[in-house]
Image (cartoon, rainbow, N blue to C red):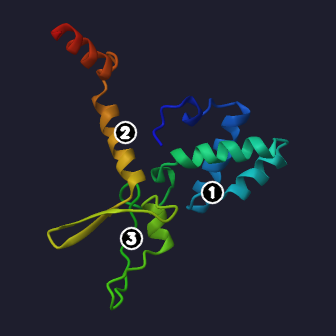
Amino acid sequence: MVATNAAYVKPAAGTKTGRVWEIADKISRQSGRLAQRKQVIDAFVAEGGNANTASTQYAYWKLLFDASTLPSTRSAPGSTEKFNLQVAQDGRVLIPAEIREAMLIREAGTLTARVENGELRIMAPKVALLRIQQLIKKMDNSEGSAVDELIAERKAEV
């Protein structure tokens, strides 16, 4: 899901919905892992907040969660230390939870893989989306929509 819908934009600080995000970020920083829904809801309710608000905002927060917000000894966002993985006779490799978390893999699905100089590189769709969003953000010159410009060019050609 692309973060263009206003519901998927981080709420303003000082608001009730923003407070849920702050709690989720704080729990994630303190534990070094993705905050769990129950932890966030319990903390928000303890402050007098509504459990349904916390649940909804947690879902939005989780969609936009960036692994780079976690403090650790990681060299780059989403990086981990080295792990030894076992390859079964049938070629299956189990990816440990810590690696899946760093790769932003939260459920079963499809990954993109390639071999580069004898090294297996695996990427989750969420990481690919974040990279594309970062590239677009760097290239955005805030001069308007590229789609609108293309449509205007095509209309001018006709």
User: Is residue 140 visible to us here?
Assistant: yes
Left or right? Give the position of 11 relative to 110: right
Which sits in the foreground, 51 or 83? 51
**Residue 61: x and y, percent?**
59, 45
- Binning the other alpha carbons within 10 Å of mark 3 as few (below 14), some (14 to 19) or many (20 upward) gives few
Left or right? Give the position of 18 relative to 1: right
- Give amino acid for label 2: Gln
Q: Which of marks 1 and 2 is in front?
A: 2
Residue at (77, 44) in percent of width and height:
52
Residue at (52, 48) in percent of width and height:
65
User: Mark 2 = which residue?
Assistant: 133
Residue 109, picture quadrant: bottom left
- Give amino acid for label 1: Ala
Are dots 1 and 3 in contact, CB under 8 Å? no
- Give amino acid for label 3: Glu
Q: SS at mark 2?
A: helix
Nearer-N-terminus badge (2/3): 3
Q: SS at mark 3?
A: loop
- Binning the other alpha carbons within 10 Å of mark 2 as few (below 14), some (14 to 19) or many (20 upward) gives some
**Residue 4: x and y, percent?**
48, 32
User: Is residue 73 visible to us here?
Assistant: no
In space, the residues marked 1 and 2 are separated at their CA atoms by 23 Å
Left or right? Give the position of 130 relative to 71: left
Q: Residue 35 carries which label?
A: 1
User: Mark 3 = which residue?
Assistant: 81
